[in-house]
Image (cartoon, rainbow, N blue to C red):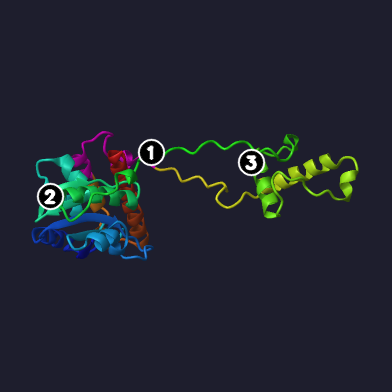
Amino acid sequence: MQAVLYFSDKQVREKLFAFVDAAQGLMLVAGVRHGAAMTRPPQAREPFAALEDVFGHVLSQVIVADEGTTAGMWRDPLGDLGDRLYPEDKKRAYAAATGYVLLEDGKPRAVVRKHASPTEDLWFLQEALSRLSPAIPAPDPTKRPGHRRPEPAPRAPPRYGPASDTGAPDDDAGSWRRSSARDGAHPGASRPRDDASSRGGTGARQGSSRAREWQADEATPPRGQRAVAAEPETKDPWTVLGIERGTPRDEARKAFRALIAQYHPDKVAHLAPEFHALAERRTREILDAWEALDRDEDA
C-alpha cells in the first residue's frame, strides 16, 4: 500500500498522523520534492517503486510530497511527526523529519538517513528492514554503497602514434589508434604510403596536419567536455535566516518558520503584484537557505 500526501493540503499534518496511528505492521514514512517539472508521481520514483514491487506485501508507505508552492511552504508535517515520535530527543526528531522513518504498528523502530542516490538509499533501507522482518532478506554486502572495488591496472602507453613535436597532447595517440582500427588497419601495421610519401618533408606536413586537426578538436571539444558556466554566487544561509552561525537546530527551525510566515500569500494578498513576486522570491531564498543548513547538518 502506498499513500501520497501533499504539502499544499491544509490537512496534511492530520492525515499523516492518522496514517501513523492506524498503521499495522511495517510502515515507511518519508518526504520528497515534487516540483511542477517532475512528470512521474512520487510513488513511481525510487526507492519507493522498488520497495513496493519487492516488499509491498509486508511494507506500507506514506510519501509526503513538497510541491514547492507558496500554498505549502510554511507547513512542516514531517517535522511535526518527528517531534511527536521523539519528544525527548531533538536530534533524533530532526533525523526522522529529513530521512526515512520505519515504524511497526505505529511505533518508531528505525531511522535511515538519505544518501547521495536512491540506489544507495534502497540498500540501507533493505538492511534496516531485514532486521525488523524475517520476510525481507538482507542486501548483498558486496554491493554496500561505498564498498571499494579493486582499481584497474594502469594502461600502458601506446607504442605508436603521432610525433610529440606536433603540439598535440598524449591522448591524441589513443584517438589515432582508434581511428586506425576503424579504418581496418592493425595498430601495429604500417600505414599505406601515397605518392607524396616518396618526396621529402612528408613527416613535417603530416605533423602540421595532425597539429591543425588537434587545434580544431580543441576549438570545438566533444559533448561532455565543454566548459560549464559558473554557478551564481550563493548567499550565506545563516545570514538569510537572520540567525548567528552555530545556532541550535531547534532554535534555527523556529526562526525559519517565523521568517517564512511573514511572506505567506494571505499576508501579501492586498499588495501590488510586484510585491507578490518579491514575496515568492524571498520565500524561495529562505527555503534554499534552510536546505543548505540541512545539507551541512547531514555532512
Of mark 3 and mark 1, the one earlier in the sequence is 1
Measuring from the top left, give residue 49's x and y in whole percent.
Answer: 29, 61
Foreground residue among 96 and 178: 178
Query: Which image quarter holds the C terminus?
Result: top left
- The residue at which mark 2 appears reads as 108
- Does residue 33 appear in the picture of this structure? yes
Using a 10 Å C-alpha cutoff, classify the residue at mark 2 as few (fewer than 14 neighbours), some (14 to 19) or many (20 or more).
Answer: some
Foreground residue among 52 and 272: 52
Specify whether 10 is left or right of 185.
Answer: left
- The residue at which mark 1 appears reads as 148
Instruction: Read off the magenta span.
Output: 235-255
Residue at (38%, 38%) from the top-left corner?
A: 148
Using a 10 Å C-alpha cutoff, classify the residue at mark 3 as few (fewer than 14 neighbours), some (14 to 19) or many (20 or more).
Answer: few
Residue 241 colored in magenta in the image: yes
Q: Secondary structure at mark 3?
A: helix
Measuring from the top left, give residue 48's x and y in whole percent.
Answer: 27, 59
Residue at (29%, 59%) from the top-left corner?
A: 50
Between disc 3 and disc 2, the foreground one is: 3
Measuring from the top left, give residue 56's x and y in whole percent.
Answer: 21, 62
Residue 295 sits in quarter: top left
Give the amino acid type for the residue marked by disc 3 in the picture: Asp
Mark number displayed over residue 171: 3
Between disc 3 and disc 1, the foreground one is: 1
Using a 10 Å C-alpha cutoff, classify the residue at mark 1 as few (fewer than 14 neighbours), some (14 to 19) or many (20 or more).
Answer: few
Q: Secondary structure at mark 2?
A: strand
Q: How far apart in space, not on screen, are marks 1 and 2 (Cα)?
A: 33 Å
Q: How far apart in space, not on screen, are marks 3 and 2 (Cα)?
A: 55 Å
Q: How far apart in space, not on screen, are marks 3 and 1 (Cα)?
A: 28 Å
Residue at (28%, 34%) from the top-left corner?
A: 245
